Image (cartoon, helix red, strand yellow):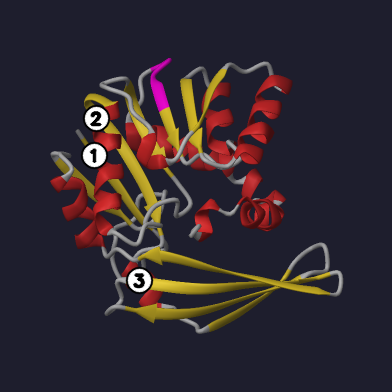
């Protein structure tokens, strides 16, 4: 039986709502912050893990970094590749499940952005992904993971959220917490053109302490938690859970 993250129809249907113009416009500023936290030297090798449509990959490449971009969704990779070609940028694109990617001591840095982690029902699979990322980095290489932290979600939790999209469609997200705040199921409902479609998106929730522990067990020697890309502390005012882990 297939799971939600293997459903190409889901990713393709929600693409314009996940990556609206405003999010794309924010990309250069996000990469400014990422370069600073990663302390990248010129021409460093960067792994964009679960890269989506490649917005960060392309921006890193524009700045002269050697970029490898990995994702399981072919349509997203094709969009990213077309944009890179149009911009005259050389990026290595790899179509792969996160658990199947392998590299050894190859990258100066890796990023995993926009809650592209915690999809697997078996927590051992999350640990495996962290081990893969650790193995991919050179000694002293850094990893940044960006997710919606458990503490943040608990603070602002709403069972139902409606969104009006620019194309006139409506989106509804209905959320349900399971297993003592370890897991969340979200029904994503799209009303567009007289049709109603829905999917269930399920992810594991991590607190700051749980994310730090997972990264350390995977082999990272130092983990710094931030509350957003601007670098504020991961405290009661945090907007995101940003983990900066050093091999």
Magenta region: 42-46
Direction from residue 164 to residue 135 in the image, left or right: left
Front residue of 126 and 37: 126
Q: Please say if 100 is above or below 183.
A: above
Front residue of 81 and 110: 81
Using the rendered view, name the quadrant where residue 140 is placed. top left
x, y percent for residue 202: 45, 66
Q: Which residue is drawn at 58% across and 54% down?
A: 7
Q: Quadrant of the C terminus?
A: top left
Direction from residue 224 to residue 108 in the image, left or right: right
Q: Please say if 190 is above or below 52.
A: below
Q: What SS does tag 1 mark?
A: helix
Q: What SS does tag 2 mark?
A: helix
The reply to whether discs 1 and 2 touch (Cβ–Cβ < 8 Å) is yes
- Residue 183's tag is 3
Report if residue 45 lies within the magenta region.
yes
x, y percent for residue 81: 65, 27
């Amino acid at each position: 039986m297939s799971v939600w993250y293997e459903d190409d129809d889901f990713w393709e249907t929600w693409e314009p709502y996940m990556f609206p113009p405003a999010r794309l416009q924010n990309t250069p500023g996000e990469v400014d912050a990422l370069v600073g936290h990663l302390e990248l030297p010129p021409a460093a090798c960067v792994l964009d893990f679960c890269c989506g449509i490649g917005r960060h990959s392309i921006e890193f490449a524009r700045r002269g970094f050697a970029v490898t971009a990995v994702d399981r969704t072919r349509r997203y990779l094709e969009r990213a590749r077309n944009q890179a070609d149009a911009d005259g940028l050389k990026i290595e694109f790899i179509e792969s499940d996160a658990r199947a990617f392998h590299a050894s001591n190859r990258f100066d840095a890796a990023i995993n952005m926009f809650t592209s982690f915690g999809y697997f029902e078996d927590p051992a699979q999350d640990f495996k992904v962290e081990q893969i990322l650790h193995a991919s980095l050179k000694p002293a290489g850094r990893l940044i993971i960006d997710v919606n932290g458990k503490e943040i979600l608990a603070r602002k939790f709403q069972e139902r959220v409606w969104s009006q999209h620019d194309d006139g469609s409506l989106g509804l997200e209905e959320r349900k917490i399971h297993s003592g705040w370890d897991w969340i199921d979200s029904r994503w409902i799209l009303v567009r053109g007289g049709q109603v479609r829905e999917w269930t998106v399920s992810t594991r929730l991590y607190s700051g302490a749980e994310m730090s522990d997972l990264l350390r067990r995977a082999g990272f020697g130092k983990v710094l938690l931030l509350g957003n890309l601007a670098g504020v502390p991961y405290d009661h005012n945090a907007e995101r859970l940003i983990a900066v882990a050093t091999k």
